[in-house]
Amino acid sequence: MRLDLVGQSERDDDNRQGNTSRLLNFYREPLGSGAKSSHVLKGVPRSNDFVILPQLFVRDMIEVGGTLYAMAGNALYSVTRGGVATERGTTVSAEGARIFGAEAGKVCTVADNRYFVWDGNTMSEPATGAFSSFGPGTYVGGYVVLPQANGRRFQWSDLQDASTLPGLNFATAESTDGNILRVMALAGRLLIFKEDAIEQWAIT
């Protein structure tokens, strides 16, 4: 398993409004010899200007089950191939909104440190388990994994059940004292990005 990390992001002169710290809708561009790193991240031009929803800032997009979903404002939209956007549900806030897919085409959202699930019919906020303030989550091996906001713990859902967060389904990323920044699934494993380390966890 190999994970390539780039050294920096860079503002694109063709996209001055792009947020270089967002790291979504970016591409890797090789750098010449003598640079500190081999690549730089540059934003796709006008990646924040989603023509389907011109009045709203698109915070995140993902394809789940062949359907494109976009988080714009504080609402989740599905978007057809023909460009028709349909609102599917709202969160209490748009702050830091991130979306990811789960089992059976469910779409999960973490916004303002709260967790929401679109199950194909309704948007709901599941009862919380070990803690109730979340960072951006991920889906790996049939489980939704949610890190604690500004903490070292993470919790996971029941198997194939994104809406159930048992109170005993949690662990602590304790190789270092740093807090968890976010989690990510890679090759069936869970990568936990911390302030001062990266931990790799396997499903057992």
Image: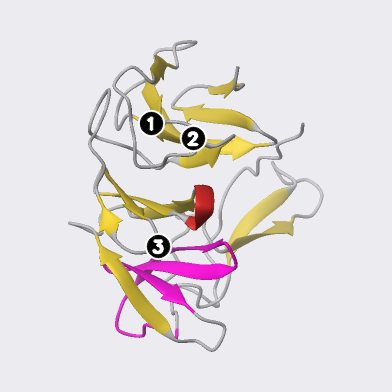
Q: Position of residue 37 (x, y in %)?
A: 70, 43
Which callout, 3 or 2, points at the residue further toward the start of the chain? 3
**Residue 163 visible to the viewer:** yes
Q: Residue at x 49, y 38 (%)?
A: 160
Which corner quadrant holds the N terminus? top right
Q: Is residue 25 above or below residue 9?
A: below
Please state which of residues 168 and 83 is positioned toward the viewer in this rendering.
Answer: 168
Q: Who is closer to the viewer here, 38 or 53? A: 53
Quarter of the C terminus within the rendering: top right
Q: Position of residue 80 (x, y in %)?
A: 51, 81
Colour theme: secondary structure
The boundaries of the magenta stretch are 51-79
Quick check: is 54 in the magenta stretch?
yes
User: Residue 191: x and y, percent?
Assistant: 57, 30
Residue drawn at the location 56% of the way across and 76% of the way down: 45
Q: Is residue 120 left or right of residue 122?
A: right
Pointer 1 local density, CA inside 10 Å: few below 14, some 14–19, many at least 20 = many
- Identify the amino acid type marked 3: Gly
Residue 44, above or below 131: below
Say which of marks 3 and 2 sits in front: 3
